[in-house]
Amino acid sequence: MKASNLIFATQRENPSDAEIVSHKLMIRAGLTRQVSSGIYNWLPTGKKVLHKVENIIREEMNNAGAQEILMPMVQPISLWEESGRRNQYGPELLVFQDRHENEFCLGPTHEEVITDLCKNILTSYKQLPITLYQIQTKFRDEIRPRFGVMRSREFVMKDAYSFDLNQEGLDLTYKNIREAYLKIFQRFGLDYRLVKADSGAIGGSDSEEFHVLADSGEDLLAFSDKSDYAINAELLVELQEDQDPASLEGKDSPDGKGKLKLKRGIEAGHIFKLGKKYSESFNLKVQGDKENITPYMGCYGIGASRIVAAAIEQNHDDKGIIWPNSLSPYEVAIVEANPKGKEDISAKCGEIYNQLIENKIDVLWENTDKRPGVKFADMELIGIPVMIIIGDKALESNQLELKIRKDEKPLMVSQEDLLNTLKELN
Ligand code: ATP
Ligand code: MG
């Protein structure tokens, strides 16, 4: 992509309503713009990051054998009456009427729609187990939308739903999706913890959350310094009765291994064994060998748009975002450090640009006539992992200057070594 064809929309000032750094940087780097409280536009650079998040999720869900579908955002409220959740869900459910005075809601989640759908498409036990997922826009009328897309009203979620013949089947499917989630979070390149999310989870693991570690996280996590034991601190306090969560630091880990450490986390994913709650209320049955079987369900969410904010919350400095390679809107930026319109510099940039594209490297060519200093600042704000700087110096010495966003130490490489060096950096 050439910068001359792009809307960057970077800005130097922090938005006045932004409390946390990811919100500030997403506006300043031109990733998003607010439309209304908790409702955002995604600009080209932001959409590219969101797309990378979604594609990592998509690939690993497909690898795990799940099948992608797309369900509607608008749901008839009658489905919520059938599940008994209409009143239980509360005011986060945005309900409205169509011209015929039929009631609908904007989907905050899709257990009702998927169970209703599966009544239609699942007939025989031979079709199970099956996991269906979508990557789709959700709406929750949050009481206090804040932190930009971190807690917005409209957001993008990957939600998956599994159907199994019995509890053992559900246990296996849950384990399989859990494995897929570990791969997904690994590929995001984020420091995360998998934590037990409910008391039932102490023995088994009926509900677990994936948290991205960051000081601004809303949840306090307690985890062992010796094992992979990790739990929501509030929950541990409840289980151990009237302690202050902060007092857990340094105590023995409940699994008998090591001491507890406390850190804050951002809930980014949630996996959950639902059992027969929805299949029973919707009377979903498949024909078995001898009798009809009510399937055991599981549900598995990842907040795709929240991941973008969480990644920034964890990876930034005072110049801007520092993307993990897998999420960066571009893998590499070529910065044309021009004395305006110098043709041989432009030609060299073009040559390298084409070479990178041929090698399937996602590259941005900063070819505008902005001052080099402004270009550098923009690329650092947007957080692109590697800048290749091409100016007079590069032409004369036949050496390209690489600036690595993470450690900022410049690296000199010849054009012949460029591809190998980029590969090594990745
Ligand atoms: P929270 O406790 O943060 O409100 P939740 O328990 O309501 O989350 P789930 O219903 O489990 O969330 O939704 C699955 C995922 O969707 C969450 O792990 C989170 O990543 C994302 N998510 C939930 N609410 C929002 C929101 N308001 N804005 C952005 N992402 C959200
Ligand atoms: Mg919530």
Image: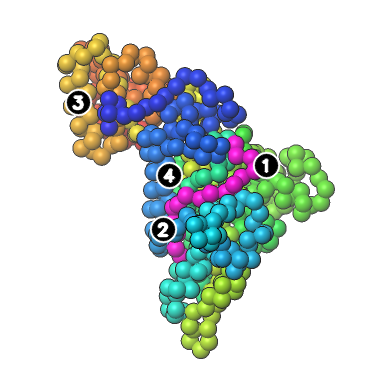
Q: Which residues are magenta?
A: 131-146
Res. 38 visible in picture: yes
In the picture of the structure, the residue carrying the numbered disc 2 is 70
Residue 151 appears in which quarter of the rendering? top right
Residue 24 falls left or right of residue 70:
right
What is the spatial separation of the Cα atoms under label 4 and label 2, in whole angstroms? 18 Å
The residue depicted at 17 percent of the width and 21 percent of the height is 347
Q: Is mark 3 within 8 Å of ligand 1?
A: no
Secondary-structure class at tag 2: loop
Secondary-structure class at tag 1: strand
In the picture of the structure, the residue carrying the numbered disc 1 is 220
Question: Residue 20 location, x and y as percent?
Answer: 58, 30
Q: Please report whichever mark, 2 or 3, sits nearer to the chain's N-terminal start.
A: 2
What is the spatial separation of the Cα atoms under label 4 and label 3, in whole angstroms? 29 Å
In the picture of the structure, the residue carrying the numbered disc 4 is 53
Q: Amino acid at mark 3?
A: Gly
Q: Please report whichever mark, 4 or 2, sits nearer to the chain's N-terminal start.
A: 4
Q: Amino acid at mark 1?
A: Leu
